[in-house]
Amino acid sequence: MRTNFNRLILTSALGGTLLVASGVQADAQTNSTAASLTGTWTMSLIGDHVIPVGLALQQDGATLTGTLTMMGKDIPLKGELAGRAITLTGSAMMMMRDHGATEGTAAPGPSPAPMKFTGVVQEDGTLSGEMAAPRGPMKWTADRLKERAATRTNGPDTAQVLGSWNVSVIADHAIPVGLLIEPDGARMKATLTIMGGDVPLTGEYGTGGLALSGEFGDDISARTGMKGAVKITAKMRDDGSIAGEFTMSRGTFPLTGERLKERAPKAPATR
């Protein structure tokens, strides 16, 4: 006798019970478990047209709970996962038309209608099955909602400002300045070489750009007259150069800089 797959049947197997529901055959190995179904799914109810539905599931062992979002309403669901076979049930408030009512009779209010989903976890991780409906069963499928790429939270890449730079501070003439930027834990340190002297700086590179600050030492002050605090603020340009401002006691001046090109190594001498 052929088994009618449009009804629920019970078949003894391996000393247990195997459930086959609504034309969906469960995995022959009842003790084989699919990957966790916890997550958000995009479900499609397939009738005369496709109805998109949201489905959020939470799996705890064989127990399933979830929420079906349909027509702007959240419908709680509960059920189980047996092997690869899925069962989910719930109840939704729906407007039920009484076809036997006379014309002009007020339509009844919404009434709870049972919902039952049966299905199976496919080999590719998708879900499919049938939903019992008043007008007959409806096929359904579900795919995991693809997560958006995580938003970058680490801020700009500090590596792009590390290294040696040729900097020009533009006053009444361009003043060549050397700038070496190095990592220093979560921040950075730098050495400003100006007028034959070195000025240590500290700072960071964040969403607002590069910010470095320090103070002229006594040796530079005695020789050049530059004293007090010094500050560099700059942003990276599309061509890889930097542009910003150089601030000291004498005022604030435009600044530009290009990464120092490394010299090619000398070829070994030949005889």
Image (tube, rainbow, N blue to C red):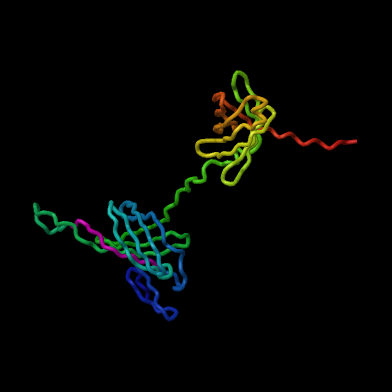
Please say whether residue 90 is one of the residues in the magenta stretch.
Answer: yes
Say if 64 sits above or below 146 in the image: below
Residue at 56% across, 33% down? 236
The residue at the point 54 percent across, 33 percent down is 235
- Give the main secondary structure of the magenta stretch: strand
Q: In this view, does 173 lie to the left or right of 15?
A: right
Q: How many marks?
A: 0
Give the extent of the magenta segment: 85-96
- Tell which of 149 and 93 is nearer to you: 149
Q: Which residue corresponds to the image point at 55% horizontal and 24% vertical from the top-left?
A: 251
Seen as rendered, the residue at the extreme right is 271
Q: Magenta includes 235?
A: no
Quarter-of-image position of residue 28: bottom left
Give 265 or 215, whichever is nearer the viewer. 215
Residue 134 x %, y % = 24, 61
- Residue 202 or residue 97, whichever sits in front: 202
Occupied quadrant, residue 98: bottom left
